[in-house]
Each structure stands twice: as C-alpha cells, then as structure tokens.
Image (spheres, grey):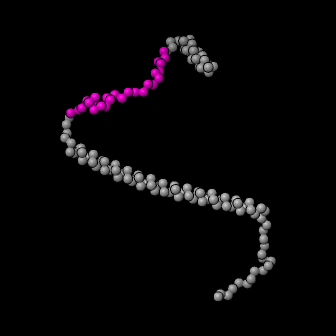
Amino acid sequence: MRKRTTAPADESSNFFVGIDNPIELRRQVLESSKKLVEVLKKYESFKERRAQKLMLVEKLKKNLADLNRLNAKLKVVMPKTNLRVPHQLLGIAADRPRPNLPRVEEKEEPQGEMERLEMELQNIESKLGKLRR
C-alpha cells in the first residue's frame, strides 16, 4: 500500500455551491448529451456516404475509361468509308424541332416625334389595362 504524501485537506478549504432545481439541471444536461449523440450519428452517416460516393465515382471513372478504350478499338476495326447514311434511315430527326417561342413583334420605327409619343401612350395604356384586370 502506498502512503499518502500530501496532507489531508483542511475543513476550511472545502466549500459547496447550492444548485437551484438540480433535477431540471440534470434533465438539461441529459438532453444536451442526447443531442450530441444524435449529431455524432449523423456525422458518421455522412462519412459513410462520402466514402460510398468516392467509391462510386472511382467505379464510374473506370467504366468510362473502359468504354473509351473499347470505342477506340471499334474505330480501328470498323472499315473507313465516305458513305453517309441519311438521317431518315437511322431514325434520327435531321432538324430538331424547336420549342414554340413567343414571336417578338417587330415594331415600326416612328417617323416623327408625334408618332413616337402616340406609340408610347398606347404602350402605357396597354400596361394600365393589364394592371386593372
């Protein structure tokens, strides 16, 4: 057994602090601990997902490299021709249909100051009409 080398503490050096509502304080500490554990679980899940993502990205890179290599081999094996197959035979549309965009009406250039002012007035009145609806 070891001997104690320090002197026993004085009764005057001991002090106590009163805690108001110790049960509430204990509940708050436990709730904080619970939240901390939940955050740690989420972090671990995040780390696992990150590792999984990196693995999938590496797999994708490998697959793309394989495809590029196989495509290069295919180009070497295929005969070279100047023959072009019409798009209709391939089932590909030659011109892609463009979405229906609203056509912008070309405005007539006013010939005089009076016509320009009338056009501006009509424009303002049409905007007012839209606001009233």
- Point 38% across, 53% down: residue: 59
Outermost residue, right side: 12
Residue 113 is at least partly visible in this image: no
Q: Is residue 105 above or below residue 45?
A: above
| Extent of the magenta region | 83-108
Q: Residue 68, position in %: x, y?
A: 30, 47
- Point 74% across, 60% down: residue: 24
The C terminus, quarter of image: top right
- Point 78% across, 68% down: residue: 17
Q: Residue 78, position in %: x, y?
A: 21, 42
Name the quadrant containing residue 34. Answer: bottom right
Residue 105 is at least partly visible in this image: yes
- Point 45% across, 55% down: residue: 52
Q: Is residue 2 left or right of residue 97?
A: right
Near-viewer residue (24 or 55): 24
The N terminus, quarter of image: bottom right
Q: Residue 60, position in %: x, y?
A: 38, 50
The image shows a total of numbered marks equal to 0
| Residue 127 colored in magenta in the image | no
State whether the magenta stretch is mostly helix, strand or loop. loop
Q: Is residue 37 above or below residue 68?
A: below
Q: Is residue 70 above or below residue 36?
A: above
Q: Is residue 54 above or below residue 20?
A: above
| Residue 92 colored in magenta in the image | yes
Q: Residue 113, position in %: x, y?
A: 55, 13
Q: Is residue 101 left or right of residue 90?
A: right
